[in-house]
Image (cartoon, grey):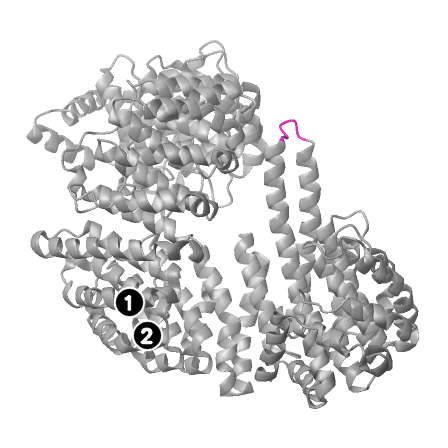
């Protein structure tokens, strides 16, 4: 019997040999034989072969690979059916082989088997059914034997989920495992060696630690960084490995910037490495006149180096990075080899965002220097110079435009004349687009003639070239440059309209070939932007032609492929046409809405992948991956996402512009939008979904209350839930803002008890989180790595937290104004948190917004509001003279609403507030820019006390002072209150206001005229009519009128005339 087993095993070795045979027929035969062996026998044979150190190395390695494959592809069929004894001996056998194995590559293959088996032995609940393997890892990490330490790391790296639900418990071990393998004192070369054996796993794990738990690297930071530098500099390694080594440093600059800033020597060594990568460019004969822009090769060193530099500058900040890099760039720009000059200019573009503040100081010398390179002998250097100018025009706008408009416009127009080099021409046009997009209109106007002349002549030449040679690259950019100039120049573009429109229409009509799709799309964009710039009157002559062209494209739309670039241009053009045509656009909706809804409904392709699949797919364009750990990644195909977001934004635009004209589509749009509040693949889609909600309710209003309520019920739950779950604070603020707007549209009764219950819990959570985040920031200020750049990022966090607080206040405002005092019992669960906001030791934005919430309660829930007076009255009165103008404004507004709406209980407090308000108004810097709003709220509050609580003050004594403080012109709402009160006083012939023999009237005319000059009151406001009537009454009494008018200056006289004409 034993002999047979022995023979079978011998035959199996032969079989393994044949599986490796170079002879196809032999190998095929062997594969068939192998397939036919029953699974359980396979395991026995393979394990035996792996154990047998006397067998040939290739055969053992082949056996190891086959066993891993078997466990990975047929685990369920083979393993559970084995007797428990066999299962145990397989598990212990594998761990034993690792300990005895002397060959490093063989040991790794066995580790692969162990990882595969462990992966299959984790049950549904995350229990690892092979506890011995965890103990093995635990022991191996601290073993003296470097081979075992490597084995532990290899198993873990192959299957990071090996600890299952024990991960937290083993976290320290995991971290130690990685750190120890890196910091191996006996063999510091573990990482080093692995790289030279073409194994990326250790570097990948380093990047992972740097990303998720950088603090664990702190004790070993110097050796880790030095190793990364060394590998990055080694040109004998593959690009991928050098980029991974650099990625360790770059990731740390993002996740542990303060820690890395202390290792300036490493940063100073890393920068030349990145620059050296950026010089790694290919010579390419056809570059200058290529007509198709190939996408950046993201695996290339040049692209990796540039991206690393950009991220590092943003992570570490310009204070550290700019002084280190400046000299290098200067030297590169003087190098006779074009690649160095190119890299220097691209580096300058890359650091603009991160080194913003520091570069601003020396922008003048940088710009003058870069402009010289637009004349460089090498076209790719000229291209890089265009790139730097375009990037700076965006990074430093609008200051860049204000300082350098003359030099930059002239230099770019000259570069656009570079007829022999299409790529340079096109990039100069692209830089011009960046420049004009953020250029203040007044600066651009003087150059319009010259710009238009150049753009037009270039367009004519390029149209000829398109017809003769079929080249289109420059034309595409020029068309967009024209659009950008028109967009900035607005009505000043009217004189040039007829110069461009016929050619542009000609392109849309005739550029129908597939390779001209992008050109046609950009031309459609250009026509619609010009239309928007020059306005309806001028555009009307072409509007119906253009609409017909668009409609024709639209009807051929069904033939367009999903990735056709025209689609997104068309969608945006329709929306601009809607803005130009207004209500007249409604007739086109039936044609437009189909494709728009189709694009807005794109469902992205998503996939759950393991690492192997990912490697096959990452080459396939358009996939992005999120690592979920555990060798699994979530992939999403990004194609179509931007288009989807644009389409959703356009639906918002239609609802906003067409209002009730859009009512036919409200139902299908709301059904699309509500689920998109949870579309986590793209922030823009969620923002559009949120923005659409109140607008759709406005559109639906014409269908009557029942339809409106149904629609609101469809959105309400989803909106409240989204406020609770939205992860991104910018999107969250939009959702909260929209929810508040919806409540204002729907009014009293729109929320039921469940809604209130859920909303109360969410708002309470937001406020608690607000306080907790403030505490966490205080803790970070005590951290050993705390420095001024950390403070800057903490300030940014603080700003976004405060912004969310303002939205909590918006929601409460909409609820108080709709529900009045009956909502107060619900509010009481939030009361302690709001009271906490107005404590004297809290930062001023907290006190400002806390007071605003109490202002709303006084304004909308009085007289019941007085039951909370003990919580807010003292802080409010004390805040009238606060150091912060924002807090003073909130307090003063509060006193005003107390007087107007508060009821009798508030009387004594109005009396007490008056001298405090006057103190603020009379302070010497009361009218400075930062103080004026607070001061005007104080003036308005004094007026409201006199008007609504006259028995609390000596009105006759206060009135002359109050008149001397008028008019208000910054705070338009309060201006209306004060002017209305002024009209009350004049209409009732108040002797103090009019003065003896109406001697105060010229002064009053001056106040009214100044108010009109500052547009303090909108003409449609009824108050305007009252003021005009006051003026007309005086007009009838000749002498008095002459006296009043003669004391006004020319502007004031014109303003009085304007007022009479408008009302």
Q: Is residue 19 visible?
A: yes
Q: Is residue 52 magenta?
A: no
Q: Secondary structure at mark 2?
A: helix
Q: Is residue 422 left or right of residue 98?
A: left
Q: Nearer the viewer, residue 562 or 273?
A: 273
Can you see residue 40? no
Q: Position of residue 706 (x, y in %)?
A: 54, 86
Q: Which mark is residue 53?
A: none
- Sequence-wise, the earlier of marks 1 and 2 is 1
Marking on residue 538: 2
Q: Position of residue 339 (x, y in %)?
A: 26, 27
What residue does disc 1 label? 497
Q: Quadrant of the C terminus?
A: bottom right
Q: Compared to 160, does 643 lie above or below?
A: below
The residues colored magenta run 783-787
Asked if the residue at tag 2 contacts the one at tag 1, i.e. Cβ–Cβ closer than 8 Å, the answer is yes
Camera-nearest residue between 612 and 93: 612
């Amino acid at each position: 019997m034993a002999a047979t087993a022995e023979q079978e095993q011998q035959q199996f070795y032969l079989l393994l040999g044949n599986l490796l045979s170079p002879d196809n027929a032999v190998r095929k035969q062997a594969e068939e034989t192998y397939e036919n062996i029953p699974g359980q026998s396979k395991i026995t044979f393979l394990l035996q072969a792996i154990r047998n150190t006397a067998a040939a190395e290739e055969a053992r390695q082949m056996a190891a690979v086959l066993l891993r494959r078997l466990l990975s592809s047929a685990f369920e069929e083979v393993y559970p059916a084995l007797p428990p004894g066999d299962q145990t001996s397989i598990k212990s056998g594998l761990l034993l082989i690792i300990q005895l194995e002397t060959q490093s590559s063989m040991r790794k293959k066995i580790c692969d088997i162990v990882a595969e088996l462990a992966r299959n032995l984790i049950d549904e609940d995350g229990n690892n059914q092979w506890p011995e393997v965890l103990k093995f890892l635990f022991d191996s990490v601290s073993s003296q034997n470097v081979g075992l330490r490597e084995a532990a790391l290899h198993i873990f790296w192959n299957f990071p989920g090996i600890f299952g639900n024990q991960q937290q418990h083993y976290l320290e071990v995991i971290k130690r495992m990685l750190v120890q393998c890196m910091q191996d004192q006996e063999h510091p070369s573990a990482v080093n060696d692995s790289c030279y054996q073409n194994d990326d796993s250790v570097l990948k794990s380093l990047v992972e630690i740097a990303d998720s738990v950088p603090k664990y690297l702190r004790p070993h930071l110097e050796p880790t960084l030095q190793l990364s530098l060394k590998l990055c500099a080694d040109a004998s390694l593959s690009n991928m490995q050098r980029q991974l080594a650099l990625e360790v440093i770059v990731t740390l600059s993002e996740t542990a910037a303060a820690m890395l800033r202390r290792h300036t020597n490493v940063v100073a060594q890393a920068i030349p490495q990145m620059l050296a990568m950026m010089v790694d460019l290919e010579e390419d004969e056809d570059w200058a006149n290529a007509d198709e822009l190939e996408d950046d090769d993201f695996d290339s060193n040049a692209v990796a180096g540039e991206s690393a530099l950009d991220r590092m500058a943003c992570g570490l900040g310009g204070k550290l990075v700019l002084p280190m890099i400046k000299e290098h760039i200067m030297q590169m720009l003087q190098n006779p080899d074009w690649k160095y000059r190119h890299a220097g200019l691209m580096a300058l573009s890359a650091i603009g965002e991160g080194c913003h503040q520091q570069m601003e100081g020396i922008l003048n010398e940088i710009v003058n220097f870069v402009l010289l390179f637009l004349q460089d002998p090498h076209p790719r250097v000229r291209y890089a110079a265009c790139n730097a100018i375009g990037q700076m025009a965006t990074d430093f706008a609008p200051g860049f435009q204000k300082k350098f408009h003359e030099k930059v416009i002239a230099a770019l127009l000259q570069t656009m004349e570079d007829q022999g080099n299409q790529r340079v021409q096109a990039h100069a046009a692209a830089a011009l687009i960046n420049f004009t997009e953020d250029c203040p209109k007044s600066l651009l106007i003087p150059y319009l003639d010259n710009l238009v002349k150049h753009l037009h002549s270039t367009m004519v030449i390029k149209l000829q070239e398109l017809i003769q040679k079929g080249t289109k690259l420059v034309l595409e950019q020029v068309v967009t440059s024209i659009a950008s100039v028109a967009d900035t120049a607005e009505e000043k573009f009217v004189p040039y309209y007829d110069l461009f429109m016929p050619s542009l229409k000609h392109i849309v009509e005739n550029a129908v070939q597939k390779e001209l799709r992008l050109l046609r799309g950009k031309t459609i964009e250009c026509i619609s932007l010009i239309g928007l710039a020059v306005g309806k009157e001028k555009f009307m002559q072409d509007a119906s032609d253009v609409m017909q062209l668009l409609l024709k494209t639209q009807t051929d739309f069904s033939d367009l492929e999903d990735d056709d670039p025209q689609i997104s241009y068309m969608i945006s053009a329709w929306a601009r046409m809607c803005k130009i045509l207004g209500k007249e656009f409604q007739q086109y909706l039936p044609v437009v809405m189909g494709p728009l809804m189709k694009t807005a409904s794109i469902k992205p392709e998503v996939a759950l992948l393991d690492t192997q699949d990912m490697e096959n797919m990452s080459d396939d364009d358009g996939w992005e991956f999120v690592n979920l750990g555990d060798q699994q990644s979530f992939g999403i195909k990004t194609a179509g996402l931007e288009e989807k977001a644009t389409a959703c934004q356009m639906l918002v635009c239609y609802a906003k512009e067409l209002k009730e004209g859009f009512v036919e589509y409200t139902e299908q749009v709301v059904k699309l939008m509500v689920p998109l509040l949870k579309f986590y693949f793209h922030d823009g889609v969620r923002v559009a979904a949120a923005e659409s909600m109140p607008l759709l309710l406005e559109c639906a209003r014409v269908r009557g209350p029942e339809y409106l309520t149904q629609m609101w019920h469809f959105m309400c739950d989803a909106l409240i839930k989204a406020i609770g779950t939205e992860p991104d604070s910018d999107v969250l603020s939009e959702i909260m803002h929209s929810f508040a707007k919806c409540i204002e549209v729907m009014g009293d009764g729109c929320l039921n008890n469940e809604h209130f219950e859920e909303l109360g819990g969410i708002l309470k959570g937001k406020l608690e989180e607000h306080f907790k985040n403030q505490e966490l920031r205080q803790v970070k200020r005590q951290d050993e790595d705390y420095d001024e750049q950390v403070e800057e990022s903490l300030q940014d966090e603080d700003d976004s937290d405060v912004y969310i607080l303002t939205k909590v206040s918006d929601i409460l405002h909409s609820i108080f104004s709709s529900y009045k005092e009956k909502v107060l019992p619900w509010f009481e669960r939030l009361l302690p948190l709001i009271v906490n906001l107005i404590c004297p030791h809290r930062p001023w934005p907290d006190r400002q917004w806390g007071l605003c919430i109490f202002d709303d309660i006084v304004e909308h829930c009085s007289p019941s509001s007085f039951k909370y007076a003990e919580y807010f009255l003292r802080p409010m009165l004390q805040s009238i003279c606060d150091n912060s103008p924002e807090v003073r404004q909130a307090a003063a507004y509060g006193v005003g609403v107390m007087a107007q709406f508060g009821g009798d209980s508030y009387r004594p407090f109005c009396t007490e507030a008056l001298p405090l308000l006057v103190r603020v108004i009379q302070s010497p810097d009361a009218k400075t820019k930062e103080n004026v709003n607070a001061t005007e709220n104080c003036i308005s509050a004094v007026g409201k006390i006199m008007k609504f609580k006259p028995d609390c003050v000596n009105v006759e004594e206060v009135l002359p002072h109050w008149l001397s403080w008028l008019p208000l012109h910054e705070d338009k709402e309060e201006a209306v209150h004060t002017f209305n009160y002024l009209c009350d006083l004049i209409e009732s012939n108040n002797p103090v206001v009019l003065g003896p023999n109406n001697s105060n009237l010229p002064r009053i005319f001056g106040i009214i005229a100044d108010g009109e000059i500052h547009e303090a009151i909108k003409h449609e406001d009824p108050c305007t009519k009252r003021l005009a009537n006051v003026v007309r009454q005086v007009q009838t009494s000749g002498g008095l009128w002459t006296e009043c008018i003669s004391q006004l200056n020319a502007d004031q006289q014109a303003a009085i005339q304007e007022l009479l004409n408008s009302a």
